[in-house]
Image (cartoon, rainbow, N blue to C red):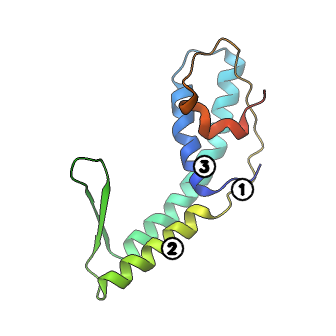
Amino acid sequence: MKITNRQAAEAQMALTTLLAMNLPVKTSLAIALLSAEIDKQVIAFAKVRDALIKNYQIKLSAGEKDGSVNFSTEKENSEEALQEFSDKVNELMGTEAEDIKTRVRLPDDVNVKPESIKPILPFLEM
């Protein structure tokens, strides 16, 4: 299945939750294989993102109380540079990732919040 880099990053976080659970061995292995496949894509995406951050001299800082992240740059024409950086990161996030082939079947008795597995629904066998 083709997914975007944004979906890969979200799926990676959801898989972390499942990897920490005590599941049957076969299910745990399938989750680990899916995680490894998605990690490969996320690592490549992160290298490009990090190069953009370095190129645009982006400084990240925590927002006030809402957990947001603030961006700033020391480059000339900082408004234009921040907009260009933002556009490129959005393009990167929307770019299709490699085809992810691994699928996972969760046991019926797994107790997981729906929002925890929503990002990996495309990889689940029902």
Secondary element at tag 2: helix
Q: For mark 1, what is the residue?
A: 98
In the rendered image, the vertical position of residue 4 relative to residue 33, given as above or below = below
Which kind of residue does numbered mark 3 sit on? Answer: Ala
The quarter holding residue 81 reads: bottom left
Which part of the image, by quadrant, shows the C terminus?
A: top right
What label sits on residue 8 in the rendered view? 3
- Report the side of 56 relative to 107 (left or right): left
Which kind of residue does numbered mark 2 sit on? Answer: Lys
Q: Nearer the viewer, residue 8 or 38?
A: 8
* Marked residue nearer the N-terminal end (1 or 2): 2
The quarter holding residue 22 reads: top right
Secondary element at tag 3: helix
Q: Residue at coordinates 63% horizontally, 46% vertically from top-left?
A: 38
CA–CA distance in space, label 2 to label 3: 17 Å
Dot 3 and dot 1 residues touching (CB under 8 Å): no
CA–CA distance in space, label 1 to label 2: 19 Å
* Marked residue nearer the N-terminal end (3 or 1): 3
In the rendered image, the vertical position of residue 30 relative to residue 39, given as above or below = above
Which kind of residue does numbered mark 1 sit on? Answer: Glu
What label sits on residue 125 in the rendered view? none
Q: Residue furthest bottom?
A: 76
Q: For mark 2, what is the residue?
A: 88
CA–CA distance in space, label 3 to label 1: 10 Å
**Residue 30 locus on image (x, y percent):** 70, 29
Secondary element at tag 1: loop
Judge the density around disc 3: few (<14), some (14-19), many (≥20) Cα neighbours within 10 Å: many
Judge the density around disc 1: few (<14), some (14-19), many (≥20) Cα neighbours within 10 Å: some
- Report the side of 97 relative to 6 (left or right): right
Q: Residue at coordinates 69% horizontally, 53% vertically from top-left?
A: 3
Q: Residue at coordinates 62% horizontally, 15% vertically from top-left?
A: 110
**Residue 92 locus on image (x, y percent):** 56, 66
